[in-house]
Amino acid sequence: MGEYILKTENLTKVYGTTRALSRINIEVKQGEIYGLIGQNGAGKTTLLKMISGLGFPTEGAVYLFGENASTNGSLLERIGVLIEVPGLYPDLRPYDNLKLKYIAYGMNTKEYTQSILEQVGLAGVEKKKVKKLSLGMKQRLGIALALIGEPDLLLLDEPINGLDPQGIIEIRDMLLKLNKEKGVTIIISSHILEELSKIATRFGIIHEGELVEEINKEELLEKTKDRLEITTNDIERAVAVLEDNLNIHNLQVIDNNTIYVYERLEESGDINNELLKCGIKVNSLSVNRESLEEYFISLTGGRKRV
Ligand code: ATP
C-alpha cells in the first residue's frame, strides 16, 4: 500500500435512516490532486469527514499513509482540513487568526505565519480585519489555517463554492502551486466537474452515497472528445458501410438509431455521401462533443436528492 496516502475500504456511514455512504473504496496516491465530484447531498462532505476523523464510519476502514487511521490517531496530524465554512474570527486580522492556531501547534514564529500568508496570497491584506475580506480571501485564509502544521494531505470541501470567476482562478492557481512546489496531496470536492477538471488529476464520482466511477484525467478527456453523431434507422448496414467501404473502425453504436464516429470527422460530407450512395437514409449527421457536465449527468442520471 506504500504509495497510497489514502485508501478507504468499504467505507459506510449511516445517519439514522439515511445511508450517506455505501461501501466506498477509493485510493489516492502521493502527489495526486483527487477531485471528488457529486451533486448536493451525494455524500462528499460525509466522506471527507470520515477521512479526517471528524466522524466515525458505521462500517469499513480508512487507511492513511499505509496505516489504519482508527488505530493510530496521530496520523490525523498529517492532514489539513477545510470542511464547510472556515471557523474564522471576524474581528481579528488574518495574521491573528493564524496565530491562534499555530500556537496550538507549537509553531510560534512570526516568519512561519508570514510564510503561510504568502503561500495563500494574503500577504498584502494582513492588516485588514477578516470581516472586511472578500469571500475568496476568507476561503484562502481557511486554506491557510488548514496548512498550519505542514500537512501531507489537504482535504478541501467545495473551496470554490460561491466564488466569482477571478476568485476561482486564484484558489486554483494557489492549490496547483502548493501541489507542485510543496508536494502536498490534495482531495478537493465540488459539484461542478468542469471546474474540477482544471485542477484534478483523478476523479471519484459519487452519487447517492455510492462511488459510481473513478477515472483519471486522460480517460475523462477521451470520453468527452469530438465525435461525429450519425442517426439512421438502418444501423447495421450503416456500420457495415462505415467499416467495409470507408475503413472506419473507431466507432461506437450508442442505441438502435445512433452511431458515434471518432475518426475522420473532417470528412463528414464524404461519409454522408457514401451512406446515401448505399441506400442508407441518414436522419442527421453532426459533429458534437459531450460536455463534462453532460458526462457527469449521464453517470448520475440527472437525479437529485430531495
Ligand atoms: P453538499 O454539497 O450539499 O454538502 P454532500 O455531497 O457533501 O452535499 P453530505 O453532506 O455528505 O453530502 O450528505 C449526504 C447525505 O447525508 C445527505 O442526505 C444528508 O442529508 C445526510 N447527512 C449528512 N450529515 C448528516 C447528519 N449529521 N445527520 C443526518 N443526516 C446527515
Image: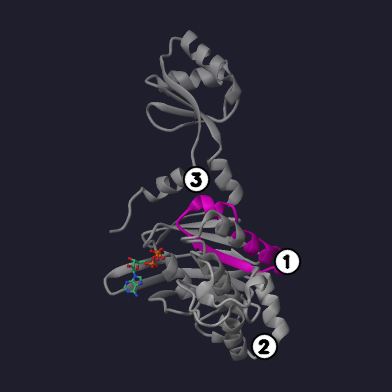
Residue closer to the observer: 18 or 62: 18
Q: Amino acid at mark 2?
A: Met
Whichever of labels 1 and 2 marks the residue nearer the N terminus, that label is: 2
Whichever of labels 3 and 2 marks the residue nearer the N terminus, that label is: 2
Helix, strand or loop status at disc 3:
helix
List x then y, in percent, for residue 30.
65, 67
Residue indicated by mark 1: 181
Q: Nearer the viewer, mark 1 or mark 2?
A: 2
Q: Which residues are magenta?
A: 172-200
Q: Is residue 250 above or below residue 33?
A: above
For the point 57% across and 47% down, which residue is it? 219
User: Label 3: how many residues lie within 10 Å, few (<14), some (14-19) or many (20+)?
Assistant: some
Q: Quadrant of ligand 1?
A: bottom left
Residue indicated by mark 3: 292
Residue closer to the observer: 45 or 1: 45
Helix, strand or loop status at disc 2:
loop
User: What is the spatial separation of the Cα atoms under label 3 and label 2, in whole angstroms?
Assistant: 43 Å
Residue indicated by mark 2: 107
The reply to whether the C-beta atoms of the residues labelled 3 and 2 are less than 8 Å apart is no
- Asked if residue 215 shows in the view, the reply is no
- Asked if residue 257 shows in the view, the reply is yes
User: What is the spatial separation of the Cα atoms under label 1 and label 2, in whole angstroms?
Assistant: 21 Å
List x then y, in percent, for residue 86.
49, 75
Q: Is residue 179 magenta?
A: yes
User: Label 2: how many residues lie within 10 Å, few (<14), some (14-19) or many (20+)?
Assistant: some
Q: Amino acid at mark 1?
A: Glu
